[in-house]
Image (tube, grey):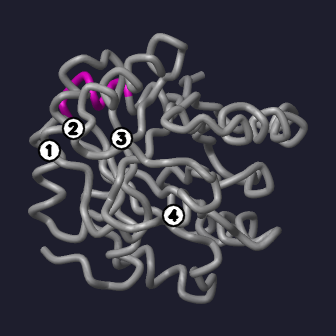
Amino acid sequence: MIEIERHLEGILRAANLKRKMLAVLIDPDKFQETGVAGFIQKLPKDTTHIFVGGSTVEEGRTCEVIKALKNVTGLPVILFPGDHSQISPHADALLFLSLISGRNPEFLIEQQVRSVEKIRNTTLEIIPTGYILIDGGKETSVQKVSNTRPLAQEEIDQIVNTALAGQYSGKKLIYLEAGSGARIPVSPEIIMAVSDVLEIPLIVGGGIRSFTQLQNAYEAGADLVVIGTAFEEDTFQN
């Protein structure tokens, strides 16, 4: 029997081989299942993953969107949940997020504890992920919902130390996020500084609206880049 590669293993292998990955993020509240086939056809040809989640999502919407996606694509569909209510057993994997840039226990451990009853009897692959919110030039939904302060882009040492603290505490991925609709993406200087010290893959998202910004993130050391709002609004600039 051929053993199926787990999704974290695939990310680790791609990162080790310097193969850049691209995820498109779907907000379930802004997605229409009737247009799912057209959505898949519009995905950039280099797309390797689909992330699903939002800061606030109507109960049940995540499941419906994931089921629709799974019917038309073989790409990995990975949960990127804003809270425990967004967990769906129909996804392939779950980014088990801890907002390590903030000090609100609700998003450091409380939401994770609440999610256990939903995930313990599923086949979801659980991927512990350190989530670091970076100031993207506007107050984002993540900031409002989590009631935490994003780290300033100038606080590079603090960002690096936070990322390393996540790695040392057992996270398998680090996610630098400027927030949905950010005016300013995470700077190449931050990405490079974090990438240079991490021994685990680095995800970068928020505010990436052009191919140039995407390439800048890759060249600075991002292993996986996430685009969301620009693709959703059909404003991504090639």
Which of the 4 image quadrants contains residue 137? Answer: bottom left
Residues at marks 4 and 2, CA–CA distance in whole angstroms: 31 Å
Q: Which mark is residue 191?
A: 2
Which of the 4 image quadrants contains residue 223? Answer: top left
Camera-side mark, 4 or 3? 3
The mark that comes first in sequence, 2 or 3, is 2
What secondary structure is found at the residue carrying circle 2?
A: helix
Q: Is residue 14 magenta?
A: yes
Kindly check if marks 2 and 3 are in contact, taking CB atoms under 8 A apart as contact.
no
Answer above or below: position of 80 versus 115: below
Q: Which corner quadrant holds the N terminus? A: top right
Residue neighbourhood size for the residue with mark 3, other residues' Cα within 10 Å, grouped as few (<14), some (14–19), many (≥20):
many
Q: Which mark is residue 203?
A: 3
Kindly check if marks 4 and 1 are in contact, taking CB atoms under 8 A apart as contact.
no
Tell me if 114 is positioned left or right of 146 in this view.
right
Which residue is located at x 36 percent, y 55 percent? Answer: 178
Looking at the rendered structure, the kind of residue marked 3 is Ile
Q: Which corner quadrant holds the C terminus? A: bottom left
Residue 148 at x, y percent in the picture:
56, 48
Looking at the rendered structure, the kind of residue marked 2 is Ile
Residues at marks 4 and 1, CA–CA distance in whole angstroms: 32 Å
Q: Is residue 89 visible?
A: no
Answer above or below: position of 76 versus 94: below
